[in-house]
Image (cartoon, coloured by chain):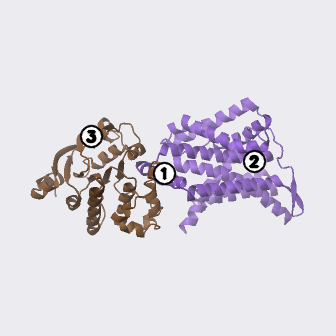
Chain colours: A purple, B brown
Amino acid sequence: MDQFLILALDASNFVLAIILVAMGLVIIFGLMNVINMAHGEFFLLGAYAVVMVDSAGGNFWLGLLLAPVFVGLVGLVLEEAVIRHVYHRFLDTILATWGLSIFIKQAVVLIFGPAAMTVGDPIDVTVEIAGAPYPVYRLFIMGVSLAVIAFTFWLFFRTRFGLTARGVIANRNMASCLGVNTRRLDRMTFAFGAALAGLAGAVMAPIMGIDPQMGMGFLVPAFLAILVGGAGLAGAMAGATVIGGADTVAANLWSPVVAQIVVFSMAIMAIRLFPRGIAGAWRKR
Amino acid sequence: MLTLEGVTAGYGGGRVLQGIDLEIAAGTVTALLGRNGMGKTTLMKTVMGLLRPDAGRVLFDGRDLAGRKPYEIANSGIGYVPQGREIFPDFTVAENLLMGVLGKPANRRDIPGGIFDSFPILKERLDQKAGTMSGGQQQQLAIARALAGRPRLLLLDEPSEGIQPSIVHEIAAAMRAVAERDGLTVLVVEQNVEMVFDMARDCAFIENGRVAERTDVAALRRDDAPLHRYLSV
C-alpha cells in the first residue's frame, strides 16, 4: 500500500510534466496546424537554461524563472524565422520542425558536450510519506505544474485573449475578417507553447540527467498522450494521465522496456476504441 | 468610398472577376445582383483580402488595399458578413459579439448598445450557444457581430439565404434603419429581389465577372427588365 502511494506520487510527477509538454503541442497544433517536432527540444532548452544560470553563478530558482522566458523567446524567433513560412503546408511543418529539432540538439552538443549533466536538488529536504522519506522537491514539481495547468485553462477559457485564440482555432479566416491580428496571435501562442515546454524542462531538471537527447523522452509520450486523449487541452490531460501513469507503473513493476511495450500497446488499443480520443468519446456520450 | 478598378481575381487558374469596375459612394446601400457563379462572392472575398487580385486595384477611402491582410482591412473600417454566416457555433451569442470587437483598438472593445435596438432577439439570448439558434437568428448575429466592430462599410453576402421570408423582411428593415441612423455604407450581394427592394437604393448587375449595368431600385420598380435579363426571373 505504501509502495503504491510512492509510486502514484512518482507517476503524478511524470504525468504533470507530460501534460505541460502536451498542452504546448496541442495549443500550437490547434492554432497553427503545425505538428511541432521540435517541442521536445524546447523541453531540453528549458533544462539547459537552468544549467546555464547555474554555471553562471545564479541559483536554481532564478534559472527556473528565466527558463520559460528564454525558451519562449527562442520560440518567438523560430516562429518568425522558420515556422511562419511553412503554415498552410502541413507536411512541411513536420519536416521543418524536425530539422529544427536536430539543429537545436546538435547546437547543445557543440556547446555543452554530449555527456549528461546534473543540477543539485534545490530543496534538499525530505518529508515522511507513508513511513518513507520522500523528496519535497518532487512535491514542488507537482505544485508548480498544477498551478501552470490551471493558469493555462484560465487563460484559454476565462480571458479575452483565450476567447480570441479559440475563435482563431475555430475559424481563422472569419476571425481575421473581424479584425483579429492572427499574425500576432500565432507568434504569442507559439511562444507560450514553447515556454510551457521550457518550464517543464526546467522544473524536471533536478530529478533527471540533463543530456541532449532528453527531449525525445517527453516528446514521444506527449504525442501519444494527444493521440490517446484527443487534440484539446482536456484531451491532452486525460491522455497524459493514461500514458504517463502506465509508463511509470510498468517501469516500476517490471522494467522500462516492458513499460514501452505496455504504453504503445495501450496507445494502439485506445486509438482502436476511441478514434477521436478519450475526450472526444466522452464528449459524444 | 469603395472603388474597384479593373479587378481580376479567381481561384487557381480560373478567373471569376474579369476586370471589374465598381464605385460605391459613401452612405449608400448598393445591391450587387447576378446569377450564381458570376463573381459576387469572389468580389466580396477580394475586397476583404481573402483573395489576392491578379490585376487591378481595390481602393477604400482612396487607399489601396493591395497586399493587406484581412484583419488590417477589417480594422480600416470594413465589416464582413460572409455567405453561410460563419458564426462561431460553440460560442455563446455574447462571445460571438465579443469576437467582433476583440481585434479592435482598446478604446473600441465594447459592444455598441445600438445593436440590441436593431436586433433585440440577441439581447434575450446572450448566453445561448450560437449554433443552437435558428438560421434567421444566426444571420442577425452575424450582422450584429460585424456591426459591433463599428465599420463604415458593411459587406453582406446573401443575407436571405436559407431564411424564412418573414425574417428576411425583418432583417432588411433593421439593416435599412441602421444604415440611415449611422450613415453606414452597405454593399449587399443578394438574389432575393424583395430583400433588395426592401433595403437597397442602388443596384449593380454583375455578369461574367464584370458590372453589366448600374441602376437604382426606383428605376427597377418602374421597369424590371434588367431583373429578367441578369437574373432570369
**Kind of residue at badge 2:** Met
Q: Is residue A111 above or below residue A217?
A: above
Q: Are marks 3 and 1 on the same chain?
A: no
Secondary structure under the numbered disc 3 in the rendered image: strand
Going by the picture, which residue comes out furthest to the left? B222
Secondary structure under the numbered disc 1 in the rendered image: helix
Q: Position of residue B71 (x, y in %)?
A: 42, 45
Q: Nearer the viewer, residue B31 or B163?
A: B31
Circle number at residue A168? 1
**For the residues marked 3 and 2, what is the alpha-carbon distance in whole angstroms?**
59 Å
Residue A115 appears in the picture as rendered: no
Secondary structure under the numbered disc 2 in the rendered image: helix
Q: Which residue was labeled with disc 2?
A: A204
Q: Is residue A259 left or right of A23 when viewed as pictured?
A: right
The structure residue drawn at horizontal position 64% and vertical position 45%, both measured from the top left corner, is A195
Q: Which residue was labeled with disc 3?
A: B4
Q: Is residue A278 left or right of B111 when viewed as pictured?
A: right
For label 2, count other residues whose C-alpha is less than 10 Å away and answer few (under 14), some (14-19) or many (20+). Answer: many
Q: Position of residue A130 (x, y in %)?
A: 87, 64
